[in-house]
Structure formats: structure tokens, C-alpha cells
Amino acid sequence: DKIGKRLDEAAKNGKDVTAQRAALAAARVSIASAQQAVKDASAQVEVILADTTLSAQDAKAKLQALHKGVLEKLRVAHKQLVDVVVSMRGLKASPSVSPTPAQ
């Protein structure tokens, strides 16, 4: 992935990327959790919609709660990725400054 490649490049340039790699690993766990939550929610939506004993309001409330839970997992994963990218700002190779010739 792009973030991993950028970390590899920074490591090649002698930068310490240990903290960023750990944060990226945590973000990947959160992403996997969010993906699973989406899959689980999809199955639960089918069950809720097929349940004829639920009133429309009860079904709506259950669907909203389900949506809220999935959305929260997605927000956490996104925030973790943003945090990794922000922490990488100082890792870019510094451009070499060559002295300008005096005239």
C-alpha cells in the first residue's frame, strides 16, 4: 500500500519509522474490524428487514443503531490512518542544500 511504501522509503533514507509502522499496524487491525462489521451488518440488515414481527419504528431504530456502530468503526480506522500520515510529515528526505557560488 502507499503508506507502507512511503515508510519503506523513509527507512531507506535512515529515518526511524518504528512508531509509524506500529500505528499503521493498529490502523490495519481497525480496518479489518470495520470490514468485518460491514459484513456482519449486511447480514443483520437482511434479518431485520425479514422480521415481520418488528414494527417499522423498531426496525428503523435497529437499523440506525447498526449503522451507528459500523460508522464508528470506520471513523476510528480513518482517524488512525490520518494520524499515521500526519506523523510521516517529518520523515521526508531533506533536500540537500548546495552552496550558491559567490559572484
Image: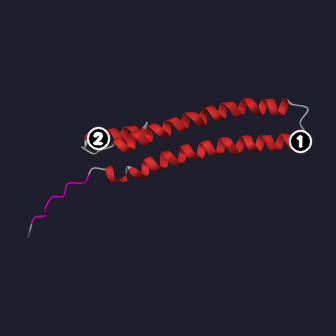
Q: Residue 91: which numbered mark, if any?
A: none
33 left or right of 45 in image: left
* Mark 1 crowd level (few <14, some 14–19, many ≥20, 10 Å Cα): few
Q: Hey, what amino acid is under mark 1?
A: Ala
Label 1 – label 2 distance at C-alpha: 55 Å
Where residue 77 sits in the image (x, y, percent)? 54, 43
Which quadrant is the C terminus positioned in? Answer: bottom left
**Residue at the spot x=47%, y=39% of the render?**
26
Residue under the image location 58 percent in, 35 percent down: 33
What is the quadrant of residue 58 in the picture?
top right
Label 1 with label 2: CB-CB less than 8 Å: no
Tell me if mark 2 has few (under 14), some (14-19) or many (20+) residues whose alpha carbon lies within 10 angstroms of its own: some
> Which residue reaches farthest bottom?
103
Query: Tag 1, which secondary structure?
Result: helix
Quarter of the N terminus within the rendering: top left
Judging by the rendered image, the residue that carries numbered circle 1 is 56
Colour mode of the rendering: secondary structure
Q: Which image quadrant is residue 32 in?
A: top right
Residue lying at 83% horizontally and 33% vertically, measured from the top left: 49
Q: Which residues are magenta?
A: 94-101
Label 2, secondary structure: give it: helix
Q: Nearer the viewer, residue 28 or 101?
A: 28
Q: Which residue is mark 2?
A: 11
**Magenta-drawn stretch contains 71:** no
Magenta region, mostly helix, strand or loop? loop
Q: Does 98 appear in magenta?
A: yes
- Of callouts 1 and 2, the N-terminal one: 2
Instruction: Tell me the quarter of the picture where residue 34 sits.
Output: top right
- The residue positioned 48% from the left and 45% from the top of the image is 81
Residue 25 position in % (x across, y down): 45, 37
Amino acid type shown at disc 2 = Ala
The image shows residue 42 at horizontal and vertical percentages of 71, 32
